[in-house]
Amino acid sequence: MSIPIRKFDTLVIGAGGGGLRAALQLAQADLKVAVVSKVFPTRSHTVAAQGGMNAALSNVLPDNWHWHMYDTIKGSDYLGDQDAIEYMCRAASHLVIELEHQGVPFSRLDNGKIYQRPFGGQSQNFGGEQAARTCAAADRTGHAILHALYQQNIKAKTHFFDEFFAIDLIKDQNGFILGALVLEIETGEPLIIEAKTTLLATGGAGQLFRTNTNAKINTGDGLAMALRAGIPLEDMEFFQFHPTGIAGRGMLITEGARGEGGYLVNKDGERFMERYAPHAKDLASRDVVSRSIATEVREGRGCGPNGDHVMLKLDHLGKDVLEKRLPGICETSRTFLHIEPSEEAIPVFPTAHYTMGGIPTDRYGQVVVPVDTGEEAIPGLYAVGECACVSVHGANRLGGNSLLDIVVFGRAAGNHIIKYLKENRYHRAIDEASVEKAMAHLRRWDQTGEGESVPQLKDELQTIMEKNCSVFRTKIVLQECLNQVLQIESRLQNVRLKDHSKIFNTARIEAMELENLVDIAVATVTAALHREESRGAHSRIDFPDRDDKTWLKHSLFFKEGRRLEYKPVRLKPMTVETFPPKPRVY
Amino acid sequence: MTSANNISMRFKIYRYNPETDKEPYMQDYVLENVTPDMMLRDALIKLKAVDETLSFRHSCGEGVCGSDGMNINGKNGLACLTRAHELKQPVEIRPLPGMPVIRDLIIDMGQFFHHYRSIKPYLTVNDPVPEVEYLQTPAQREKLDGLYECILCACCSTACPSFWWNPDKFRGPAALLQAYRFLADSRDQATPQRLAELEGPYKLFRCHSIMNCVNVCPKNLNPTKAINGIKDMMLKDMF
């Protein structure tokens, strides 16, 4: 069977903020860029980001990028790579201004400048008073940024393949990435997109967990494609649980709600964060606040008939502030809870939110893998955003740093690709064996007969992960969790589709998404089981302390043999002094 | 979970798979144990878990991605923002009207996005770019509220009789709302071109203020008001 081929300079997989920012850089440089997305670009999950994007503009309170850098490193529990963090924080102001010029409707201060709000983990002067660093468009900042970036790409005439699903990377014998095999969802026909460079910008894998703030599409497709191409995943044990997802439902209530003055209370009406973080209180880092909530609930101070959540109080802020600064979460509360936040508190609980780990890259977005002498870039392959691990978030991401991450590294990857293409001007010969392997992966779903169902298996996977691999972890539970996930992995072989039609077969897409989730679950649990310390979002009850002597290092999980390797944290920044690890208090 | 508040619900859902069906038909479904907090999207996911051929778009589940627009008991809306219990039974679900159907509840949105692209939905500034942000007062910024929040779900345009009649020529409420989003932006400098682009009997002036768009918008936006805003600007431009 001959598969149609399209050729581009660059293939971008994923049309969230990271993919679109990179695509824009490339299209503006007159390169031929194809953006493949399994949903229409403005449906990408960047659209759901609420609170804002960090940059030390000093529009509200004194600030500078170096303070932002310190906060990010401390927030990462010192697992973040300090060169990449310096790069990101230095670039932040420039990129926010650029987005504003591109049309993002940021909220405004009376003097006409961009509105900034306080967010968790932010400080002035290296751990001093609270900073106000998060640039916001009400509580719809992700929507505003994603739409503006899509609009700029329309202007730049980027080539979009909307509703195409990427199946696997195509790789030759020399390790070059040559593009990908994709599936046109509408027709069910495969297509090879050949490209001199391929950028993965496929987002996170929040669907690993039953209750999550993520969209249905967040199945970590790029992470799994990387694993199948022999590329390891870095720091997968670090998964962020957002302190304020709507209890039992998962919809996100932005950290901006606390930034605007909201606070958490337990069943006694106590503002309990004062006990856990006397200085920062409700604006401590997310891992700290999530653990505090989980502890309150575990110790019997949770709210509701089952004592299984705490309450987020906003009513004291007044209707005006809520309508102006937090209109989206007001809507969400009304729609899903029939609650008016100006009158009643919102029930919340830590909810799976963000994949800190991912495809290992350097600060140019190049995917890097370990070799004897250190690490080496995979020629032609890049990754940015939530699917990548640069690592700027380390063991815990600060709120407001993900929108920043995607635009900073989307642009940086775009720039590096431009340079790479100058030196690599021609397409390499396509590797038939690699195409055949990807096609076999797709054809596997043509198998007929009786078998297990995709939704059943996905539901079991999500339940196992939520019960055993969430805010608090232990060896015994993680070992059992790994066994269960491996059983799911083997049962996946017995899954059969009933729907074998070609046209817009969503069941087939969901089956391939489940395969991706299972690969990522194995990586996550294996890495979590082996890291015997508590750092950032990875909290081991059996190893309650951070252990810098043994564990100040990144994990790398390889699919083959479920092997783990480790690599050092890059503690040396680009120009400034190292921030050495020290006890982390808020 | 079974509880006294759970109900069994009946659905009649539009089905069409061009590979196997000569023509569309309505299929009956029953779903047991629909809880009071369940949204229509949750119900459809449960139906699909039993009948995986049932096809519809959906993603974020909270009304920001705009994927799951459909016609629910005769009214366009997002499945994820619609509480199942509040719907009259049997719940009749059809694809958004007036557009080609690809399969079941999935429509071809090509024309809708064509109109969106054609209004040049991007900020246009001719002056040299400053090194700081363009200043905009809170009052100027407030003019964008009710405009920039559009999620491109197409509920409005596919509820518009003028759009049904002239889907190739009338831009439709969604695209016109976006046009006004840039006309209303104090930073944008392409007002004359944007207005000129919308002249003529069709692109803008097919709107007869029927206001179906306002009635169905899941984000409570008001495209009719935006369209009138454009008409006002055109009039001021003429005299």
Image (tube, grey):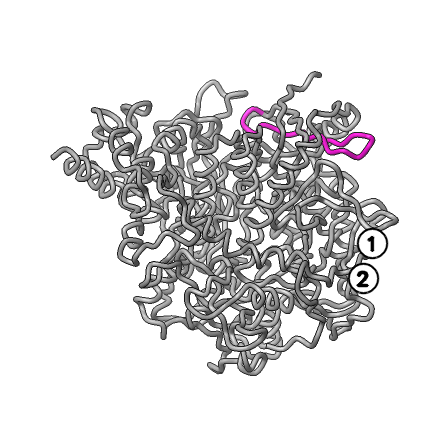
Lower position in the chain sequence, tag 1 or tag 2: 2
- Residue A514: percent from left, percent from top: 66, 43
Q: Which mark is residue B10?
A: none
For the image shown, how many numbered marks are present on the structure? 2
Q: CA distance from mark 1 to mark 2?
A: 9 Å
Mark 2 falls within which chain? Answer: A
Residue at x 47% of width, y 70% of height: A62
Note whether residue A576 is visible: yes
Give the residues in magenta.
A170-187
Q: Which mark is residue A530?
A: 2
Q: Residues within 10 Å of mark 1 (few under 14, many from 20)?
A: some
Q: Quadrant of the N terminus of chain A?
A: top right
Q: Residues within 10 Å of mark 2 (few under 14, many from 20)?
A: some
Question: In the rendered view, does A511 fall on the left or right side of A301?
Answer: right
The answer to whether mark 1 and mark 2 are in CB contact below 8 A is yes
Q: Which mark is residue A564?
A: 1
Instruction: State the residue lying farthest toward the left.
Output: B239
Q: Depth check: A23 or A415 in front?
A: A415
Mark 1 falls within which chain? Answer: A
